[in-house]
Image (cartoon, rainbow, N blue to C red):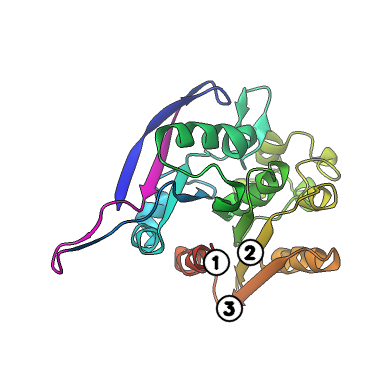
Amino acid sequence: MVLFRGDIKCKSLQRRTSISVILPADNIHFLSDTEEIVPQPYKTLYLLHGLYGSDDIFLANTSIQKFAEDHGIAIVIPCGENSFYLDNKKAHAYYGEYVGQELLDITRNIFPLSDNREDTFIAGFSMGGYGAIRNGLKYSKNFSKIGMISAALITDEIVDYTDDDNVLWSNSFYKSCFGDLDKIKNSDKDPKYLIENTADIPDIFMACGVDDFLYDKNVEFYEFLESKDINAEFMQSPGEHTWDFCDRYVKEFIKRL
């Protein structure tokens, strides 16, 4: 396994930004004197972190490095700040465009990654789960599967939030990410709208703990997908909004790739 951590310059953000990349290369077993060669170019998962995170947070809180090696898949983890992976025109911070297209172009130019849609996937945890469904649909020509782990599917309710000391429930914070909250519905920031207006919808995998504060929102969205005959899978089990749950179910998604 090869782990690369560095930064890249991107047009979408008009600055340099950090990424972490796991490559299933050099899978050498020293004790048995054997080596497993994963054919190139690699299948690739673009994995999006949640609120307060960065590109290294999955490395610190999950065991996906070894899991990626064992399953012969590359994983690219960008830094999405607290952007919800949306495009902010005023700040020239086009995070949706970045993770949906430019990041693929950059990493494929540097690393031996497949440019085949069937080999390219996007997933995320919490805020990253929202970013995965929004950009996996908006850029559906690039991704064949979308993974949503404890996804922050909150676009129907944030319009009712007020300002207080907790950023998770702050009206002002969400305005900085989404813009006019009254205009989210029936826009490309609304996952349901994108489902109804995307021709080639990727397969969708969802997982959420039954004790998670986002559980009801995830159940409701899965039921919406079922009503639209979307190819979707939903896994649930006892669990809260934790890294333990994320670690378990991001691996379940990787198994399906």
Q: Residue at x 60, y 38 (%)?
A: 83
Q: Dot 1: what SS?
A: loop
Q: What's the residue type where badge 2 is placed?
A: Phe
Residue stretch rendered in magenta on the structure = 16-33
Given contact means CB atoms under 8 Å apart, are the residues at marks 2 and 3 in contact?
no
Q: Dot 3: what SS?
A: strand
Name the spot of residue 183 as percent of width and height, x first: 84, 38
Q: Dot 2: what SS?
A: strand
Q: Which residue is mark 3?
A: 237
Q: Check residue 256 in the rendering and tell me which mark sits there, or answer none.
A: 1
Q: Check residue 37 in the rendering and tell me which mark sits there, or answer none.
A: none
Near-viewer residue (41 or 178): 41
What is the CA distance from the residue labelled 2 to the residue labelled 3? Answer: 15 Å
Mark toward the viewer: 2 or 3? 2
Mark toward the viewer: 1 or 2? 1
Query: Local crowd at mark 1 within 10 Å, few (<14), some, or many (≥20)?
Result: few
Q: Is residue 131 visible?
A: yes
What is the CA distance from the residue labelled 3 to the residue labelled 1? Answer: 18 Å
Q: Which residue is mark 2?
A: 205
Q: Is residue 210 visible?
A: no
